[in-house]
Image (cartoon, rainbow, N blue to C red):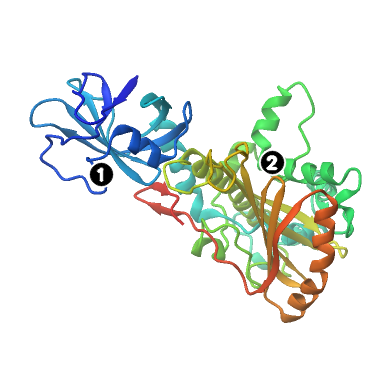
């Protein structure tokens, strides 16, 4: 649907158009709308290139006193008035629409399916209170290989008489399969970035992290062996434990997941390193029921990261300076002492504005920002913030321990040279004490608001 923009005193055609160069007859003030600007000026301020599309949010649906309808749209942080003619639009406040610039016109490309957006938001809200820390959950699973699990209490049975049983063979085999696919601390050595196969190894860790479990499972079409994947490996452990209790997979849906306190306090802050207490596992053998509930919380944690990523990406463009796509995932790995750890990774893509003043002759290239957080035994908590727009790269490293800060600063010249050897222009490279301020998505009125 074309939405022609007024310029000066051009009469308003009956089709959808962006009001400009004149006054509307709504009788209602619209904060942030400059009605003295021409349509071309308004589009120039949006920095929207020809044939480029973006998302807009419907802020208000109004009726004009003289007849016709009007929408107030929020596009890239600016409010725009759009006349829709005599026919009332099939839109309401809060709807997200996709628009594309065609010359000095805007075209309505479509409306985001509200049912899909609402479904994602609802699924995210339902799982938020029931997230289990993956690192502590993995530690508990590894402990069960040595200590075993307590069986389910039978009617009239005292807890003291509930003996500990070895981990069922099928569950142990599934757990060993999970450990086999986890990243190892000694898999990549310093300076291995240029080594053949290093990039493929990192890509494999990302692929098998569980963030793409469902899509990878669909790609097999059910005719091949299930792909190697962290989330699917947890599901196999669950199936084995249920079978050992004579229960069907449907019984798992009736369990209440166990949640970690730190994830209840800030469920949508990512990355967020676990506190020392949250990452410690109990030495007391857990029961099969407790382990299943913990596994349910671990699955919820991975699913929350998936839904969180979808939400941030779906609403990209509605906020000024927001990334066009976001991916949140956790990579489980093992220390040399076979202790489980997790690395939290946030990847964001930012679209470069065309015809930038700094480089008017340079083609539009996306900027990628990476935020990696992990807690190492001796170095302590570390955060890496990397920004890459070919061929330039910059990095900030945050460390909480003074000894780690000193060691990293000593290694910065070597890191700078290694990046230069890869053909990159190192714009900025430094290490700071403390930790960076992390973005936290806020949940309002059962919808996800991505303002940090």
Q: Where is residue 43 in the image (x, y as percent from the top left)?
A: 37, 35
Residue at 52% across, 41% down:
353
Q: Residue 246, labelled with which disc? A: 2
Q: Can residue 281 be spotted in the picture?
A: no
Disc 1 designates what residue? 33
Residue closest to the far left: 66
Residue at 57% across, 48% down:
358
Figure quadrant of residue 16: top left
**Position of the N terminus by quadrant:** top left
Q: In this view, does 59 lie to the left or right of 397?
A: left
Q: Residues within 10 Å of mark 2 (few under 14, many from 20)?
A: few
Q: Which of 247 and 8 is in front in this view?
A: 8
Q: Where is residue 228 in the image (x, y as percent from the top left)?
A: 78, 38
Figure quadrant of residue 24: top left
Identify the mark nearer the N-term, 1 or 2.
1
Q: In this view, does 49 lie to the left or right of 446?
A: right
Local secondary structure at mark 2: loop
Q: Which of 282 and 261 is in front in this view?
A: 261
Residue at 72% across, 81% down:
402
Figure quadrant of residue 160: bottom right
Residue at 63% across, 66% down:
274
In the rendered image, the vertical position of residue 78 relative to residue 442, given as above or below = above
In the rendered image, the vertical position of residue 163 relative to residue 357, given as above or below = below
Q: Which of 58 and 253 is in front in this view?
A: 58
Q: Nearer the viewer, mark 1 or mark 2?
A: 1
What is the C-alpha distance between the residues marked 1 and 2? 65 Å
Q: Position of residue 359 (x, y in %)?
A: 59, 44
Q: Where is residue 383 in the image (x, y as percent from the top left)?
A: 67, 64
């Amino acid at each position: 649907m074309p939405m022609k923009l007024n310029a000066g005193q051009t009469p308003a055609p009956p089709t959808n158009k962006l009001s400009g160069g004149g006054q509307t007859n709504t009788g209602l003030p619209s904060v942030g709308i400059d009605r003295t600007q021409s349509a071309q000026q308004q589009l120039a301020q949006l920095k929207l290139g020809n044939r480029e599309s973006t998302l807009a949010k419907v802020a208000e649906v109004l009726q004009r006193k003289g007849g016709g309808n009007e929408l107030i749209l929020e596009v890239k942080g600016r409010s725009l008035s759009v006349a829709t003619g005599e026919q009332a639009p099939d839109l309401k406040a809060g709807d997200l629409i996709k628009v594309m610039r065609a010359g000095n016109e805007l075209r309505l490309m479509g409306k985001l399916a509200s049912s899909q957006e609402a479904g994602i938001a609802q699924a995210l809200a339902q799982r938020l209170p029931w997230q289990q820390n993956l690192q502590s959950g993995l530690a508990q699973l590894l402990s069960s290989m040595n200590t075993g699990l307590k069986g389910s209490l039978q009617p009239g049975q005292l807890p003291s008489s509930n003996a500990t049983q070895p981990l069922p063979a099928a569950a142990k085999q599934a757990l060993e399969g999970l450990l086999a696919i986890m990243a190892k601390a000694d898999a990549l050595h310093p300076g291995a970035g240029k080594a053949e196969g290093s990039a493929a190894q990192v890509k494999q860790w990302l692929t098998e992290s569980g963030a793409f479990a469902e899509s990878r499972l669909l790609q097999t079409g059910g005719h091949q062996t299930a792909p190697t994947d962290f989330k699917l490996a947890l599901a196999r452990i669950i199936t084995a434990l249920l079978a050992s209790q004579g229960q069907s997979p449907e019984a798992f849906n009736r369990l209440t997941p166990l949640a970690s306190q730190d994830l209840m306090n800030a469920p949508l802050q990512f990355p967020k390193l676990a506190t020392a207490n949250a990452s410690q596992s109990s030495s007391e053998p857990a029961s099969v029921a407790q382990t299943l509930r913990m596994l349910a919380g671990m699955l919820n944690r991975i699913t929350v990261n998936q839904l969180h990523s979808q939400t941030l990406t779906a609403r990209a463009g509605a906020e000024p300076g927001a990334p066009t796509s976001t991916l949140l995932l956790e990579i489980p790995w093992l220390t040399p002492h076979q202790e489980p750890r997790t690395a939290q990774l946030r990847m964001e893509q930012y679209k470069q504005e065309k015809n930038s003043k700094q480089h008017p002759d340079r083609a539009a290239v996306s900027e990628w920002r990476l935020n990696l957080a992990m807690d190492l035994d001796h170095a302590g908590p570390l955060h890496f913030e990397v920004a890459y727009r070919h061929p330039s790269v910059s990095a900030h490293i945050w460390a909480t321990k003074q000894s780690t800060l000193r060691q990293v600063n000593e290694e910065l010249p070597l890191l700078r040279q290694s990046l230069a050897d890869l053909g990159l222009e190192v714009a900025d490279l430094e290490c700071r004490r403390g930790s960076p301020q992390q973005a936290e998505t806020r949940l309002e009125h059962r919808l996800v608001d991505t303002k940090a």
